Amino acid sequence: MESATDKLKIWAKDLDEETLAQAERTAELPIVVGHVALMPDAHPGLGATIGSVVPTEGGIIPACVGVDIGCGMAAVLTDLTIDDLPDDLAPLLERVTVVVPAGVESWAAAVRPAGGDAEAAEWLHDNHPHTALNEHLRAKAFDQLGTLGSGNHFVEVSVDETGRVWVVLHSGSRGIGHFLATSHIAIAKAVAKRLKLKLPDANLAYLIEGTSEFDHYIADLQFAQAYAAQNRKMMLDAVLHELFVFAGKGREVDRVNAHHNYTEREHHFGKDVWITRKGAISARNGERGIIPGSMGTDTFIVEGLGNEDAYRSSAHGAGRTMSRTQARKELTPESLRLAMAERVWLAKRAGKLVDEHPAAYKDIDEVIEMSSDLVTVKHRLVAVLNYKGT
């Protein structure tokens, strides 16, 4: 741990003033108990800091969970080695772009792999949010189940230190999760206004346990977290099928999953509290997790050390150092192509992907170093194929 105050415990080095001030505002809330833990990848977010772990009693802050409820990582170890793959991975990338629609609108014309429509329909039949959805939202939830999205979401085929092939994926609850999150953030603000709650930031409005608003949020939260997990499952299954067809053989050996935008009831420092991880993963002793870098850098499979001061949590990735606007202004497609030179990727879209440039993120090796009392590294994965939506 780098430093600590009464209300903050910090694992990040050289935090900027905005991040620190935002975390301090969160820690001031009356429902926050104990301290807020800031992970090595901490940086500003909507209301609450991305890369923070927030314990609350008697309420939950919807904006602290975030607008991509259940966003997280999944990684699959296969029995393939790098020697089992053809030298040219471009045909595999082309197939992945077909079976995993990505981007802002491309999902609308998505064609799922065989059986995908039935799986999506069955899952949505058995799972539904508390909030009633109109026909448009129901159709969107169906259409987007099994799609990647844009921004920092990605699919990668990677190789570990022994040459074994992994598939790594980052995505969340898509449009339905965003709709539910923003709806409940608005409800929390309305509740705060009605109750005349004094808040250091309107986006830190919270829902009070025992109220109908709180119960409805928990029900929708649990649905969105489950939707995000199912979304990753369907995409992984599709990519693995294409990988094994491409290689002419292969099977799944192991699978690791890790939410990093969620809340759940946990026991810490002698009491049951709500633990909200906004851009942080659970890292109980022996628990496996995934910490990705940025586009062009490596991903780490880790094992938790159960650090109680961090509420048994760890970083969720590299963390941004530049906003997307700043990255587009200061970084170039040419430098992105240089950073991605050793990988098969959508190089023709470099101009649209420049805001995901590695230089816009923290150094993942430094993040891992700062996490040394939070997790132990088990595998380092180097991507040979990267796919992002635009």
Image: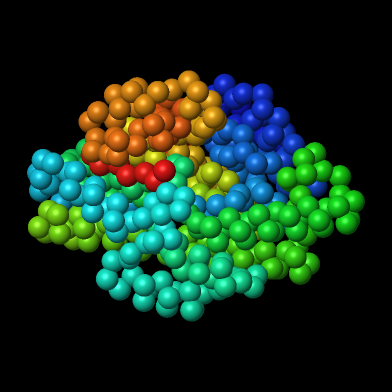
Q: Is residue 142 left or right of residue 341?
A: right
Q: Where 313 falls versus 123 (above or below)?
A: above
Q: Position of residue 43 (x, y in %)?
A: 58, 33
- How many callouts does the rendering have? 0
Name the residue at 62% across, 23% down: 16
Q: Position of residue 41 (x, y in %)?
A: 51, 34
Name the quadrant of the N terminus: top right
Q: Where 210 falls versus 153 (above or below)?
A: below
Name the residue at 29% across, 62% down: 237
Q: Is residue 264 left or right of residue 214?
A: left
Q: Is residue 325 left or right of residue 87?
A: right
Q: Position of residue 302 (x, y in %)?
A: 38, 43
Q: Is residue 345 left or right of residue 135?
A: left
Identify the image quadrant of residue 194: bottom right
Q: Is residue 190 visible?
A: yes
Name the quadrant of the C terminus: top left
Name the residue at 23% across, 49% down: 94
Q: Is residue 1 visible?
A: no
Q: Where 254 falls versus 223 (above or below)?
A: above
Q: Where 332 falls versus 40 (above or below)?
A: above
* Most foreground residue, 277 or 233: 233
